[in-house]
Amino acid sequence: MDIFVLVKTVPEAEARMELLAQGSGLRVEEKWELNFFDAVAVEQAIRMKETMPGVTVTALSYGPRSALEGLRKAVAMGTDRAIHLEGPELPWAEPMEVAWILSQALRKEQHDLILCGRKATDDEAGQVGPMVAGFLGVPYLGPALSLELEKSQGAIQVVRDLGGARERVRCPLPAVVSAQKGLAEPRVPTIQGVMKGMRLQPEKMSPEAQKIPGSGWSLRGFLQPPGRPPVCLVEGQDAVSKARELLRLLREEAKVL
Amino acid sequence: MEKGGIWVWVEHWEGSERAVVHELLGKARELADCTGRQLTALVAGSKALEAAERIQGNPDLVLVLETEGHHQPEAPPFIHALEGLCRQWSPFLLMAPCTLRSLQWMPALAVALGRSMVSEVTGLELQEGEKLLVRKPMHGGRFLVELHSCASPPHLLAIRPRAFPRKKAQRTAQIEKIRVEECQGALEVLEFLQDSGSGPELAEAAVVVAGGRGMGGPESFKMLEELAGLMGGAVGASRSVVDSGWRPASQQVGKSGKTVSPDLYMGFGISGAIHHIMGMDSSKVVVAVNSDPNALIFQHADYGVVEDLHELLPALIQELRKGG
Ligand SMILES: Cc1cc2nc3c(=O)[nH]c(=O)nc-3n(C[C@H](O)[C@H](O)[C@H](O)COP(=O)(O)OP(=O)(O)OC[C@H]3O[C@@H](n4cnc5c(N)ncnc54)[C@H](O)[C@@H]3O)c2cc1C
Ligand SMILES: Nc1ncnc2c1ncn2[C@@H]1O[C@H](COP(=O)(O)O)[C@@H](O)[C@H]1O
């Protein structure tokens, strides 16, 4: 069984970032991590490999040189193969374009199950997984809270999070499944794993030059939301007087009550 | 009646529409009025008519999609029909709330129509009459990206809850029913599990009261529930709290949980790690309650109370109960 995990490298939450002149782009400090939800997806894939014979797990990433960082982490966690689809460094990429490029690469490889994250924490789109499914013409299930392969290995059952409700759904393979937090707790790689990741020479693929269908938005620029003024500390003799003063401020000054 | 124009997808469950639907309808009305377009609301699935009647105030027309069988609003027959309707009527804009539900179908629709979409939209303007300028947060709200539409309609947008104010209107839109063909999707639904819970949905709530590890244990959250009840709000939690099993995962606020933008966010016993801040920094007014005057969360708050939350929470509840 061939499992692919779509992995994206994103800036760490702590990475410093600033606007370029006129908001034309972002300058991002070189502190990268494997997208949180993709780490969950990698963990799920590796657990399937560990509990079943004949499973190969491949991490696939599209992006600039920094994409290697996420691939290293995936390999350190235990994926067998890592493929780097080389792409330009862009401050914003159209999810449909990314999905098209990933799906074209996936077409060239034998795949039974494709795992991805619920969303990338940099662009916060949540679109690439379902769009890859759309381009490949296979079902999309997610965000998954659990994933089981049926004994026949021809179908899966997923509990998906619908926000306020959950649903157990079933579909034949191949399929795309996105990972929600809770699907599997990403492991801390072993020292040997980390070494393997550091030595990684990923397989390289060039994206299809063909123009993607229906690109619809162009980047105008970036803005920084205004920061908050310094905090106003609520004074009072004791908890009761602080509570009273806080409620007064919320009513009279902030006008939110 | 002319059916192109601006379309709003009414997300509902068994006839109860999501609060965010009214925000979308308000914004869509404004766009429709300033471009002289029709505003059409689309409602599908079980008890669609109940939802249709409640949202009649804003649109010019409500299209109710019906099937022979009993289906959820996002079931394959409706999404398939929606694709056909988009081709037939060429709407200028299709807006849906950005939720885990709409992210199931809108990306697929985008692929089918060959039109890309924007999700988590928090800003939307018309320029030169026909071009759209949209804004959406990136990097946990640290930046907003601005995008211009550059393809022909329909433009597909998934709009974040609480991005636009709720607006009431006095219209009584015409309701039109459309019978759609049954069709089988690849997915088989085996079981539906409704999460228990009362009060507003976290992402849609005007008030969020969130607790962190400083709450000390799951019992203290009873106080937060009571406070939320008194303020008409929802309870949120930090990741540590969820990972300790004190609260359900659906209440986690932050980078790996939900993003909230209430009018008022109150954090109790939360240290203010960047991962948590990413999920609540777009709130209008932030109150932080922490016994440590150096807690990071005070750097992201409008009002701070340096106090033991076990003292402050009962006092707040007491004062609110008095109505004082
Ligand atoms: C990839 C990744 C993703 C993450 N995603 C999220 C996320 O989505 N959401 C999230 O919240 N975190 C997330 N985290 C975790 C985050 O980094 C912090 O660890 C977490 O937010 C800390 O939770 P806390 O503030 O409840 O606990 P702590 O950091 O332990 O803080 C507890 C606070 O309570 C105060 N306190 C203690 N007792 C009292 C008292 N009696 N009265 C008043 N105050 C008191 C303390 O002073 C302290 O400031 C993520 C981390 C990573 C690495
Ligand atoms: N450049 C990329 N390379 C590989 N996978 C990606 C890429 N971009 C997005 N993905 C996958 O798609 C998921 C959703 O991304 P997004 O739609 O950008 O929020 C991510 O969690 C990844 O699993």
Image: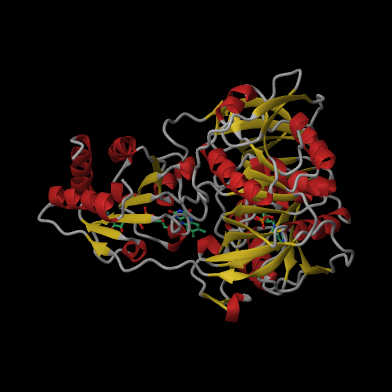
Figure quadrant of the C terminus of chain B: top left
What residue sits 27% from the left and 38% below the top?
A: B223
- Is residue A62 shown above or below B267? below
Q: Position of residue B85 (x, y in %)?
A: 80, 37
Q: Position of residue A15 (x, y in %)?
A: 52, 72
- Is residue A209 shown above or below B24? below
Q: Position of residue B164 (x, y in %)?
A: 52, 49
Query: Which residue is farthest bottom?
Result: A21
In depth, the one of B64 and B309 nearer the eye is B64
Ligand 1 occupies quarter: bottom left
- Is residue B41 shown above or below B276? above
Q: Is residue A255 visible?
A: yes
Marker count (numbered): 0
What residue sits 58% from the left and 47% below the top?
A: B27
Q: How is the image coloured?
A: secondary structure
Figure quadrant of the N terminus of chain B: top right
Would you identify the image quadrant in which residue B50 lies? top right
In depth, the one of B186 and B324 nearer the eye is B324
Query: Which residue is farthest top?
Result: B68
Q: Is residue A75 visible?
A: no
Q: Position of residue B67 (x, y in %)?
A: 75, 22
In depth, the one of B129 and B81 nearer the eye is B129
In depth, the one of A202 and B105 nearer the eye is B105
